[in-house]
Amino acid sequence: MPDQSLEYKVYQQIKDMMLNFDIVPGQRIVITELAEKLGVSRTPVKMALIMLSKEGFVDYAPRQSCYTIHQYSKEELDSLHDFRVLLELGALPKSIENLTPAKMKELEKKAQDFKRAGDIDKRELRFMLDLSFHSCFVDLAGSPYLSEAYREVYQRFFMRRRISNFFGDRYTHAFAEHEEILEAFRQRDAERAKRAICTHAAATKEFVDSIYF
């Protein structure tokens, strides 16, 4: 969405609030309060909510004439998970083909940044660093459409509610799984990378399901 209108800026601000869990799934949106918080009139907020509703981020109840933040069901999350894996695997052949020493160093740095965030009690930072690592090797495929679709799916996958205990054993395992993906890229081994990505995705899904359901 290249449009930089006020409605689009408000759209982005509301979406960022959702990603930061300033507003959470199931929460009812009071347009006047949100407009005041964002320092704008009600109209751009209404337009932004219509845009978000069309994309499935918020739900509109005509009888109550109100918006609420969409809360994903297990079936929806399973579909998002499957689509996310398909996008990563689809990017894989071109990503390895386009890999350069500089890009490999960038990918390694992003993995290290994620590891260091394990000692920092900031959910949003950990989320963004994990997205940064995964989107880095998806971006290597060189398709802006694929990259945009991946970020969208990833955001939806982790937008259901706060993941407050993304620490401990799961965080350690996640970093080890990242390392296996890195090693596969170092070896330019597409089959190994595929296995590593699928293993990591399955473990992530199991962890998320254990929290939500």
Image: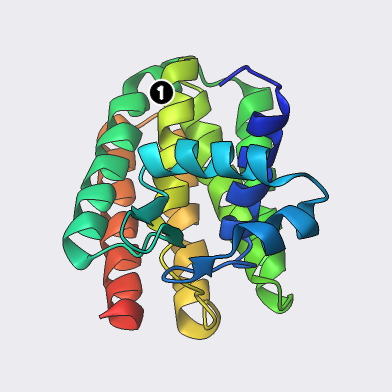
In the image, 15 versus 49, the foreground residue is: 49
Please tell me which residue is depicted at 52% across the width and 26% down the height of the picture: 139
Is any atom of residue 55 visible in this view?
Answer: no
Name the element at disc 1.
Answer: helix
Residue 196 position within the rendered picture, expressed as x and y whole percent measured from the top left: 32, 50
Residue 20 position within the rendered picture, expressed as x and y whole percent measured from the top left: 63, 62
Quadrant holding the C terminus? bottom left
Q: Is residue 99 left or right of residue 83?
A: right
Q: Residue 65 lies in what quarter of the image? A: bottom left
Type of amino acid at the residue the image marks with label 1: Leu
Q: In this view, does 123 lie to the left or right of 162?
A: right
Vertical comparison of 170 with 40: above or below = below
Q: Residue 30 lies in what quarter of the image? A: bottom right
Q: How crowded is mark 1: few (under 14 residues within 10 Å), some or many (20 or more)?
A: some
Is any atom of residue 66 visible in this view?
Answer: yes
Vertical comparison of 110 with 3: above or below = below
In the image, 181 versus 48, the foreground residue is: 48
Please tell me which residue is depicted at 68% across the width and 40% down the height of the picture: 10
Q: In this view, does 189 lie to the left or right of 191?
A: right
Q: Which residue, given by chain and number where applicable, does mark 1 sit on? A: 146
Q: Is residue 175 left or right of residue 207?
A: right
Quadrant holding the N terminus? top right
Residue 109 position within the rendered picture, expressed as x and y whole percent measured from the top left: 69, 45
Please tell me which residue is depicted at 59% across the width and 20% down the height of the picture: 100
Vertical comparison of 174 with 136: above or below = below
In the image, 111 versus 100, the foreground residue is: 111
